[in-house]
Image (cartoon, rainbow, N blue to C red):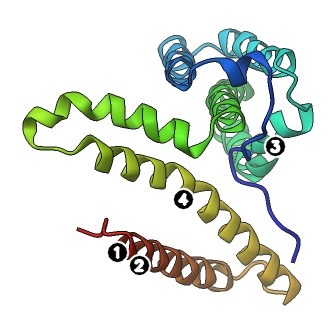
Amino acid sequence: MKKRQQFLGRYLPGSGWLHRLPTGWKLIGVAVLSLLVLVFRDPRVSTVLIAAVLAMGLSARLPIREILAPVRRIWLIVVIIIAFHVVITDAWTAYRIVSTLLVCVLAAGLLMLTSTVGQLLGVFEKLATPMRILGVRPERVGLTAALMVRSLPFIADLSGIAADSARARGLERSVRARTVPLVLGAVKYATDTGRALDARGLGD
């Protein structure tokens, strides 16, 4: 079976400025962009930010195919949103929602393309350090956050595989054919992850 890419993009080794930028600053950038689109809720602002994110990715020497990969993976969601709002509300509302979503997805994609799991883990640990006074272990918080971030692409891939399998059997309209393999795969992934953590003494 053809190997699938991650939902938000796989890490691409490189020497561009985004690769050299500290991961913490990139995470802040994603948060700021997400906050801007949610505060302004203006398609014109979102369009400018989409162009800015694309420009950043290209200036960091990332392939446009990889930059746009997350968008290709949510195309069905985008189509459903547009169709729903065109019918129920209007095209302007549809574009406002879709453009907001694209800013967040593209920005998160750049973060994943230029940051390793170890770098993300380090940032999450630093963010959790103040919680040490409450008895929380920052390294556990960092590990949990990193596992969550890396689990999302896996679940997205499972969804795609389940859809492909249902389509191959002529059951593309069957909710059961799409969801049962997804749920079983997710449970297996969680179980395997738990066993791996237990083997390393991290299961408590």
Q: Is 91 drawn above or below residue 153 in the view shown?
A: above
Instruction: Choose between 167 and 91: the one closer to the eye.
Output: 167
Provide the secondary structure element on which disc 3 rests: helix
Q: Which residue is mark 3?
A: 69
- Residue type at mark 3 is Ala
Is 28 left or right of 104, judged from the image as shown?
left
Judged left or right of residue 1, residue 44 is left
Binning the other alpha carbons within 10 Å of mark 1 as few (below 14), some (14 to 19) or many (20 upward) gives few
Give the quadrant of the C terminus.
bottom left
At horizontal 56% and vertical 53% (from top left) the residue drawn is: 150
Q: CA distance from mark 3 to mark 2?
A: 32 Å
Q: Amino acid at mark 2?
A: Arg
- Marks 4 and 1 in Cβ contact (< 8 Å): no
Q: Position of residue 197 (x, y in %)?
A: 39, 69
Disc number placed over residue 151 in the picture, else none = 4
The nearer-to-camera label among 3 and 2 is 2
- The earlier-in-sequence mark between 3 and 2 is 3
Compared with 71, 191 (above or below) is: below
Cα–Cα gap, marks 1 and 3: 34 Å
Quarter-of-image position of residue 138: top left
Callout 1 secondary element: helix
Q: Which residue is mark 1?
A: 198
Q: Which residue is mark 2?
A: 195
Q: Secondary structure at mark 2?
A: helix
